[in-house]
Image: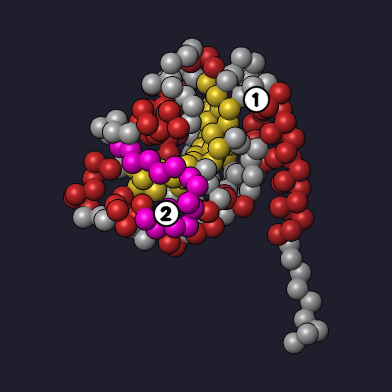
Amino acid sequence: MSNVVVVRVDEPILESNKKIASQLRELFASRGIHVFEFLGSPGSGKTALIEKLIECYPGDLSEIAYIGGDVASTLDTERILRHGVKGVQVNTGGACHLEAIHIRKALRELDIDGVRVLFIENVGNLICPIYFDLGSSMRILIVSVTEGEDKFIKHPVTVMNCDVIVINKYDLVEVMEVDVERMISDARRINPKAPIVLTSAKTNYGIDNLAKILGLM
Ligand code: MG
Ligand code: ZN
């Protein structure tokens, strides 16, 4: 057993990702850009919440940019661009997460002059995106009440490493018969530091609270 050689392919990838992420972080800091990365399952409401934050943004919309990661489509980026902000789509070609190098490539196509806020929407996935730092200022985890109340317990690494936890689709809480108190206490136990926000992109519930936590209001 002790002769078994274990080849770990993940470490060099993560190391090089870390290096690019820290270069990106320096670039964003030097330009005064606040970068918010949204992570969550497909259908958790990442795009909808970004749209709501754009709608209530008090500054000029030219100060906002968006990078959307998706396996294949451009649907989310089209939705965001309709609001009059600039953005680009990163198609990962099947990969299930964004890496820092994707952000660097996206920035070649995105004019960030005058931008104060950059939203990065990761590929819908609760597992591996958290391992790839994208140089963001804050990582926001979105879990909707329709996903089941055990989501936080099933994905502790993601919960532990995010900066803000959003429980979305709160308007459906009664229909879904979800115990939100339990969700909150699970999240709190796994990550005692991250603020937890209840939101509904449908009714606007909690959107102002989220905007305040992100410093966008
Ligand atoms: Mg989306
Ligand atoms: Zn992945």
Question: Horizontal placement of 110 versus 82: left or right?
Answer: right
- Name the residue beneath numbered marker 1: 109
Q: Secondary structure at mark 2?
A: helix
Q: Quadrant of residue 207?
A: top left
Residue at x 71%, y 46% (from the top left corner): 17
Q: Quadrant of residue 65?
A: top right
Which mark is first along the chain, 1 or 2? 1
Residue 187 — which label? 2
Residue at the outermost top position: 60
Beta carbon of the mark 2 residue lies under 8 A of ligand 1: no
Q: Is residue 135 magenta?
A: no
Image location of residue 178, percent across then percent down? 25, 55
Is residue 117 visible to us here?
Answer: yes
Question: Horizontal placement of 209 versus 111: left or right?
Answer: left
Image location of residue 206, percent across then percent down? 32, 34
Q: Is residue 170 above or below residue 149?
A: above
State the count of labels. 2
Residue at x 75%, y 35% (from the top left corner): 23
Q: Provide the residue span drawn in magenta.
A: 185-201
Q: Amino acid at mark 2?
A: Ala
Q: Is residue 193 magenta?
A: yes
Q: Check disc 1: other Cα within 10 Å, few if <14, some if 14-19, many if 20+.
A: few
Q: From mark 2 to mark 1, how far is it between C-alphas?
A: 37 Å
Residue 125 — which label? none
Residue at x 43%, y 61% (from the top left corner): 153
